[in-house]
Image (spheres, coloured by chain):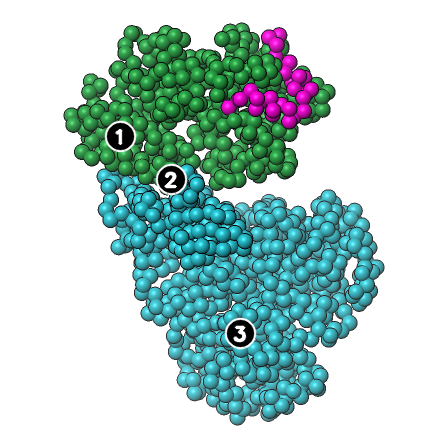
Chain colours: A cyan, B green
Amino acid sequence: MITITINNKEIKLEKPVTVLEAARSAGIKIPTLCWHEQLEIYGGCRLCLVEVEKMPRLQTACTLMVADGMVVRTETEQIADVRRGILEFLLINHPLDCPVCDKAGECELQDLVEKYGPAKGRYKEKKRKVPESFEDPLIVRNMERCIICTRCVRMCENVQGASAIAVINRGGHSHVEPFSGKRYDCEYCGNCISVCPVGAIMSRLHRHSYRPWQLTGKTETICPYCGVGCTLVLQVRDDSIKRVIPKMGAPVNNGLLCSRGKFGYEFVADKERLTTPLIRKNGILKKATWEEAITLVADTLKEIKDKSGSPAVAGIASPRCTNEDNYVFQKFMRVALGTNNIDSSARTGYAGAQRFIENIFGEGATANIISGLSNADSVLVIGGDPMAINPVLGLQIRACSRKGGSIITAGNVKGLKYFSPLKLQAELHSETILLEGLVSALKDKKGLSGSNKKLEAEIKDINISSEDVAKKCGVKKESFIKSVELLSGAAAPAIVLGKETVQSSGGSYKLLLAAAINYLINGRIYLLSERANEQGLLDMGCMPDSLPGHRPVALAEFRRRYESEWNAVINDKAGLSIFEMIDAAAKGSIKAMYVMGDNPAYNLPDSNAVEAALNNLDFLVVQDIFLTETGRLADVVLPALSWAEKDGTFTNMERRIQRLRKAVNREGMEDWKIVSEISKNMGVSLNYRDTEDIFKEISKVSPLYRGLTYEDIDKGSAVYPYKGEPLRSLTGDIQAHKGAGIVHGKLHVRLERPLFHSGTLSRRSPALIKISPEAVVKISPDTARALSIENGNIVMVSTKTGSLKLPVTIDKEVDSSYIMLTNNFEGKGAFSLMGYSIDPATGAPCIDNNEAIVERVKV
Amino acid sequence: MEKMLLKNIENPASADINEYKKSGGYRAVPKAAGYKPQEIIEMVKKAGLKGRGGAGFPVAMKWSFACADTKFPKYLLCNADEGEPGTFKDRPILEKNPHLLIEGMVISGYAIGAEFGYIYLRGEYPGAYHILNRAIAQAYENNFLGDDILGKGIKFHLVVHRGAGAYICGEETALIESLEGATGQPRIKPPFPVNAGFFAKPTVVNNVETLSNIPIIIEIGAEEYSKIGSPDCPGPKLYCVSGHVEKPGVYELPMGTTLRAIIYEHCGGIKGGKSLKAVIPGGITTPVFPADKIDCPMDFVNMPRHGSMLGSGAVIVMDETVCLVKVCHRALKFLEHESCGKCTPCREGTGWLRSILERIENGKGAEGDIELMLSVSENMMGKTFCPLGDGAASVVRNFIKHFRNEFEEHIKNSKCKMKN
């Protein structure tokens, strides 16, 4: 126990902290500027100088560690003089342009001068002049206002790890710049903006459109983009979101954001948002009233169900919608339409992969706390770039590297390349050999413990030498051996698994191998998740074979429990997966489909074929916030409220349930409300007052959430396994499929999952479009040379399933065996070029076997 | 006094290892190898050697701190970033007697348990860079550097690193930052370099002259050494004298020689028989002396008693023709330029003081400017991150303290009378 005295107040401390922290813990305010809770100590601004007895000089409270018996004074005449002096220094070159500065009102310097500063300036010389920089489309730099606290630089370098900005020049000429001196070449996380105490680095998105005190709503909600589930604070003026800021201390992101979360909110106010329902009349979608639309949907669905039976109806749920939306949706499908034909785009990887892994290790195997990654001692990343897919999770891996952990990357993981990864870059289609090699080597090192007999039986015969690995997949032997050493010696290893592995030929077998590696090293698996509520919709039972809480629909015992709660009969036959639905639609056996908040005609591989299949339906209902590719095919389009306009909950990839809160008002209905209105019109009452009411039912019905309330969620205690019962014992046999071999020597199409885009939402966010404006095809320098193509040339990329005209970007990190495309831009989606086969074990599409022909288009 | 640090300096080939050996060089290495490292530290302690970089910190104490730290490896860095205006005392060692420094570093490395040393050399000494590299190569050839020096089981490797011109990199933690490849800015202390210095390992940073004293102590013994110069901080001292003296240059004299003796006995008095006006005794940031204070012995103990500091021993002599406002302005211009910008008072204060001084010197001074400068320097003093800002404040305060009338005249007459 350390006892110190600050301003005659005795403070007892468990462990040594800085004087500043000690003071804060006792409610004593010491002014600071360069200090920031997320950043390493700097000691530059000198505002926190305090008097310490027995020390000849004044000491900075932020750097000085407490010592037993220390006597500190923070409010003496001398300290008041010091603060006045320091603030005067800061102001001599700071323009007094508060009336036109967006920061005024929440500017830390302004507040401090108000409280401690001199009333009058004594500086008669010329102030430093630096023109404001508008070179960047998103971030404006006003270096006259900069006080060189370097928070932004420390954030960028030591927390975000982008190292995109630095202090340029020296002394009084110091200012902060990106290395180009102009536009930022960075990850656009905007975290520099979050920590800037003055108006030196600001977002251009809301420039001069508000004063901080005019921001009425300050709603805490969850980011609508990826599965990490960062807490965002939406700040609103006149019912329009002015800006998004992070929240310090929030459980997942603790004050950090990524480009999508920070800058991707403008879609909410997009002019092209759907405002009224649309009904197809004479082949054209025309505006209609809610009454017309709902009656039409209810009547038609009922008619088709009555005529063709329940199996002829299917529903697609949404990983962008809340748990409550999805719960009501699946209940509607099951109760009102009597079908288990409910699935979602989670089927494209996440759902099957999670099921596969849980089948080996038990339910909840992937529910690992994201921040824990930074404390791992080695992290193996397979099948995706966490910094692009789940950026804030990626930051934890970067933190792990910074703390001395080893990062091993299988595949091209761009976002970690400056974090000293050990690279195991297997050639295209040879990842299986690499993973087999790892299993084989780890088995030799660690031996089989016998605790998971089923898994051991699957891997006992795998035997590949490191030489073979090196030879067959082009991985450096030394790197391979070193990574085996690191993984086998790790005390707290983690495996981060991306969708590219799941979506490749033999995906389930690779999952088995990844699981085996995890088993051998006793690690934790993190499954990257591209959508905000991918996990939640699965938990809500939006799966053809599971009821809410992952209870198999096939088991009568479970079914009966839900039947009694829902007061309805549940179809005992498992439904179709999303891909089976598309096939059935193409064949005509499914006649009606209800798509809530997703865009299968764009988001599923072989999208041209999906479009044809959806066109073959008798009746397609699409409920979304924009008129998507799928919406354009619909018979009825129902406008929904967006994420910022509704309440509810999301469950993130670590299976933490968090609250969404309404920030802006808009006319219309939430997804769940629309669904219940339709249900009501079909004579099945789904009567809920609000989302909390729905959640009450969820926690009553689903054993996983037993007794869980919104209050628990608010307290932050809604972390898996909640208070409920997971199904740990229900493990079946392991079924994995090695997949067919793929012929090499041709160019294959590969999907790029970029940092700046997600699809439907991001393409309506002008800021993200400014950073990354168009779809391109990335090809290797060798391919470019072979085809005489230069950067920016337009090429035609053709595969068996379609063709696209795209500009070329030559990328050194692309290899000559493939080309890379994104699936984010309208009319330019990679999925139109990708045929697939289904992995029987995971139900996920394998999209890695698409040969492409690239030809230059003569302009 | 017989020259020890600059021994053999008149020999044009003094930088060559054979000439160095001929004059008795490299005898200290085998001798030191006969002692235990701890015994060498004891000798240095008994000799009373104080760091010659400016602060006068007891060398043996610094070494013991580094020895007490259990982390490995340890590093020995030689601070050859001689950047204080007026200072050129290390240059003759670097250029004329590099083997003395190398020998000193080998022994010091052995004493503190460092197997790697770096010489952080002032970027503006290109000659010294080549000379040092040649000397190091010769030392390797002759097995005075390497994995097993002279077969005595001592390992020491030495590399010269050139600075890029920042004055602040003479501050030891900024030097370490720069050596690591970062921007040269001082670090938060503690931890001190002796515990977490170069790459967070225990690191001793010593000045060129300091390290060059080590072979002498080994050679003549601590007792003999401690008899040289001032009893409180003994040893030979290099004084570099510039400005208005007949014979400016580097003088090796016993520590504690008075300023008067340096100027009038050794340097031949004021140039052209003019009268002395002021002396900056230890480099530009040490407090200026008016002419009547030059009887002070130049050492680490007596100078502070007389209101200044020995600093680097850089004596800048100014005769009656010098405008001290201009000198003060020039000093601040330098310090403003060299302020690293990390901390507020130094970054903003140096520029502010410089611009006021510029105005005064240009005849645009206003009433109250002197008080304002005193207040601004008070706001800097003791509040900056490192001594650079303190130095700047102290320059202004001391020039005003001793020569206030000159400042007042400038303001009153709206011009500098020294200007035509």
Label 2: which secondary element: loop
Q: Where is residue A573 in the image (x, y as percent from the top left)?
A: 69, 84
Q: Mark 3 points at which residue?
A: A712
Say what amino acid the circle numbered 1 marks. Leu
Could you say which is closer to the camera, residue B90 or residue A401? B90
Q: Position of residue A381 (x, y in %)?
A: 65, 55
Say what amino acid the circle numbered 3 marks. Asp
Magenta stretch containing residue A791, yes or no?
Answer: no
Quadrant of residue B113 within the rendered picture: top right
Q: Majority secondary structure of the magenta segment?
A: helix
- Dot 2 and dot 1 within a common chain: yes
Q: Name the residue under label 1.
A: B357
- The residue at 55%/63% (across/down) is A228
Magenta stretch containing residue B25, yes or no?
Answer: yes
- The residue at 27%/34% (across/down) is B373
Q: Name the residue under label 2.
A: B383
- The residue at 64%/24% (across/down) is B39
Q: Residues within 10 Å of mark 3 (few under 14, many from 20)?
A: some
Q: In this view, does A178 lie to the left or right of A815?
A: left
Q: What stretch is highlighted in magenta?
A: B22-50
Q: Where is residue A333 in the image (x, y as percent from the top left)?
A: 58, 84
Label 3: which secondary element: helix
- Dot 3 and dot 2 within a common chain: no
Q: How crowded is mark 1: few (under 14 residues within 10 Å), some or many (20 or more)?
A: many
Q: Is residue A823 visible?
A: yes
Label 1: which secondary element: helix
